[in-house]
Image (cartoon, coloured by chain):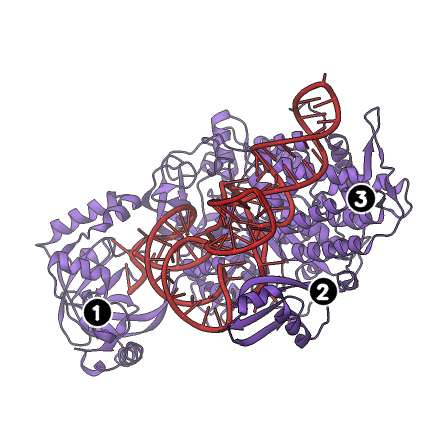
Chain colours: A purple, B red
Amino acid sequence: MAAQRKQFPFPEFETRWQSRWLEDGAFRAPNPGETGFDPAKPKYYVLDMFPYPSGEGLHVGHVEGYTATDIIARFKRMRGFNVLHPMGWDAFGLPAEQFAIKTGQHPRETTARNIARFKAQLQALGFSYDWSREVSTTDPGYFRWTQWIFLQLYNSWHNPTTKKIEPISTYPGSEPDKVRLAYVAEMPVNWCPALGTVLANEEVIDGKSEVGGHPVERRPLRQWMLRITALAERLISELDGLDWPEGIKLLQKNWIGRSEGAMVKFSIFNSRFPVEVFTTRPDTLFGATYMVLSPEHPMVPQITSAAQRAAVEDYQKQVGSKSDLERTELAKDKTGVFTGAFAVNPVNGELLPVWIADYVLMGYGTGAIMAVPAHDQRDFEFATKFKLKIRQVVQPPDGENWQGFTGDGKAVNSQFLDGLSTTEAKKKITAWLKEKGLGQGTINYKLRDWLFSRQRYWGEPFPIIWEANENGKLKHRALDEKELPVVQPDMDDFKPTGTAEPPLSKATEWLKYSEKATRETNTMPQWAGSCWYYLRFCDPKNSERFISKDAESFWMTGELQTSKSQLRIRGGVDLYVGGTEHAVLHLLYARFWHKVLFDLGHLTTPEPFQRLVNQGIILGPDNQKMSKSRGNVVTPDTVIEEYGADSLRLYEMFMGPLEQMKPWSMKGVEGVYRFLGRVWRLAMEETQEGDWKISPDLKEIDLTPEQLRVAHATIKKVTSDVEDFAFNTAISQMMVFTNEFVKTTPRPVAALKILLPLLSPFAPHLAEELWENLGKKFPDFKGRASAQPWPVHDEKHLLVEEVELIVQVNGKLRDRLKAKRDAADAELEKLALASPKVQEATTGKEVVKVIVIKGKLINIVVK
RNA sequence: CGGCUCGUGGUGAAAUGGCAGACACAGCAGACUUAAAAUCUGCUGGUAGAAAUACCGUGCGGGUUCGAGUCCCGCCGAGCCGACCA
């Protein structure tokens, strides 16, 4: 098959065009102030989620999104935009480090090799990236600025009065370390013994590590945290102005998990300290019949009675040894232990038994709840199992069973709340609690602060040192930005230490910053580098700043200078394409950093990505997710070898809607390959010797009215389809166009002058090659196909004198008739009623109404 | 259990509330060829019919509408995500 003669000589011209584009910098986007910059051109920033260059290379799934953005980039250039379309590498990360450990090669070497392979694969697809802007997160010239941004976080705080991130110097208190956006905390973390590292909650799936699937346990460790929760509110509300899929916005909202409720203080009968509880249903306070603390709650040891101590400690041990997986799986059946303590219900002085149970999580709210079994499913199950009191305090509307009823209703058995609706009761009790100093209304979030340190070698070192203060206690201090970048030392042994000490702790030389100070040995997580790469692309070589003011302003807002008073709501990357797997984490983290830098005055837009599009997953030919173990992975290399890059690009776009999940089919590739062959033969003819020459059928003749109609309908449809990301239907329209012209001889060469520019974003190599060939004979074909202005359709060619109308009787198709395009309604009605088929269908019936839709149909309603 | 997305030929899929199945794939028949490949032509939702044509048809049941694949309600099924979030 591979040796088979190709339908058109793509093996020769595809690589030739790729080198020509590279050589003459065809897709270089000039920055303000650079040669070639034209201030009259509007900007368009189209971005792919840059890849992690794994050892596996790209598969056809990666290529889908990249092809879509490439089509948009090429389209926008032809429409006169200054298009920024960059590519780079998210190259820090665990797989490279683990591969290094296994093979003894330095991750820097394997990473460089993987990048070279990825780059070659991308270039073989003819993508129009501006390669002069290539960045890698592992390059010291890049991560120097990642570290610089960390310093911004370290040196700033969230001012609750202004609700903005401000320099730490505006903090009026005496303990700045308590408010910094980057802070140190002793946290129970997800420790993965196999990987020898701590993982973020997001990297743990069903109690196992996302990478490798190793078991993960909880253990307390000193960690760097980022105070993302300070911006929780804005991370929700500022989603509103973004052109993102609603589903993704919802995912982010749910992840942040805002809920309104109240904090309520319960005093404990035998303790000096109260226990605080968060509830979204303060209106059910009179229905609280017991209280539950999380087994890890710090108050548990103090309040536990002597009689219950053994049972409580036993239960704590049991829960502690369970992985998160077991804990949630076994959670179907409620478990718990009585502490022997009693809490006092602040509204009525009732004594409530205090239990511990693992269905209450330390990580949410205060780690303690008031249990209202009558109106909460979990409390109801628990109370039923342990025979605790259940008291109704909400009357459901229309006579529903009140047991376990969690909806809104009317308050009962609640003294001064009785008769109030749920909403009113919430308001009243919250005000009452506040007045008595027993609680207050509050908003709680599921979002936790971001665990930002990793015990790894292959990541950005922190620009932090530890030195002893007067009391001999170690204290962290930020390095000056002049000391950046902090580069990892070259080490032969970067294996995990097996303890919580990171591999960098073995670099004894590097570790020592001065007589009194040592370096932080943790490194940043992989997310760090990808949080701001879209900014660096705007000004990738800048050694003075992470991005120049001019470049930032131009590529984010389209204006050369944006004064503070003109700050934009819209702006940023115009189009961002990538998979849904980054719907919460990467996108949330990047938005967080962007907002911090925005508040600190380094950026001109509050959001990084104006428009987001998610491409669907491409399944293997067997309809299963592509994976090495299933053996159903299709690589671009094999497809390009056999059918060429243009066929691969075209097929990826022809498969179906971009956002949809769809299976791969080699037969489908063959289909678009045949189509490209037909386009080729529109212009070229094979000689006896097997060479190609310009087809003698091509003549400088006018298009017929019908040909003009097809041509202009194609311009119109392809243009609007590209704007709507409906690439599959754009391609089918170009197939219609081609089918119209292959059968005609002589063939108007003007048809190709329309088709080739339309086709060039999709199949750029073929379009360039044919355009250049035609230029040798027809002087009309100047320059390059990819540099042509985008064709514009003329509506006058689409109008036809006679249109076919369909005639329905009661919505059922009965006849078709031809009529003048602008015929009057009354005339059409008369024509339709005169049709024999209509008469057949209406005899003996009364015509009630006739609906005429101009140019489309006539519907006769009979009774 | 909850949320989201989606159910259309043998397959991938089209269809601003207005001719369901465009464009492809596969299949069948034919042309070219010694033959094959490639290419080209025709047919290709189901049932009945030689055909014209007729009837049926977008997961199921209701509703809105002159008219529903499309909008609304309820079910069934699939995929993805989140799952004890108080």
Task: Label 1, secondary structure: give it.
Answer: strand
Where does label 2 land, which residue? A559
Q: Is residue A664 above or below residue A334?
A: above
- Identity of the residue drawn at 45% across and 43% down: A454
The amino acid sitting under disc 3 is Thr
Where does label 1 land, which residue? A266
**Between A415 and A103, the one nearer to me in the picture:** A415
Q: Chain of mark 1?
A: A
Where does label 3 land, which residue? A744
**Between A272 and A220, the one nearer to me in the picture:** A220
Do pointers 3 and 2 mark residues of a single chain? Answer: yes
Marks 1/3: CA–CA distance: 87 Å
**Between A153 and A441, the one nearer to me in the picture:** A441
Q: Is residue A255 above or below residue A732?
A: below
Q: Left or right? Give the position of A458 relative to A404.
A: right
Q: Position of residue A486 (x, y in %)?
A: 57, 44
Task: Label 3, secondary structure: give it.
Answer: loop
**Mark found first going from the N terminus, 1 or 3:** 1
Q: Left or right? Give the position of A631 relative to A487.
A: left
Disc 1 vs disc 2: which is toward the camera? 2
Marks 1/2: CA–CA distance: 57 Å
**Between A119 and A304, the one nearer to me in the picture:** A119
The amino acid sitting under disc 1 is Phe
**Mark found first going from the N terminus, 1 or 2:** 1
Q: Is residue A741 above or below residue A446?
A: above
Disc 3 vs disc 2: which is toward the camera? 3
Q: Chain of mark 3?
A: A
Other-residue count near label 2 (Cα within 10 Å), few / some / many at <14 / 14–19 / ≥20: some
The amino acid sitting under disc 2 is Glu
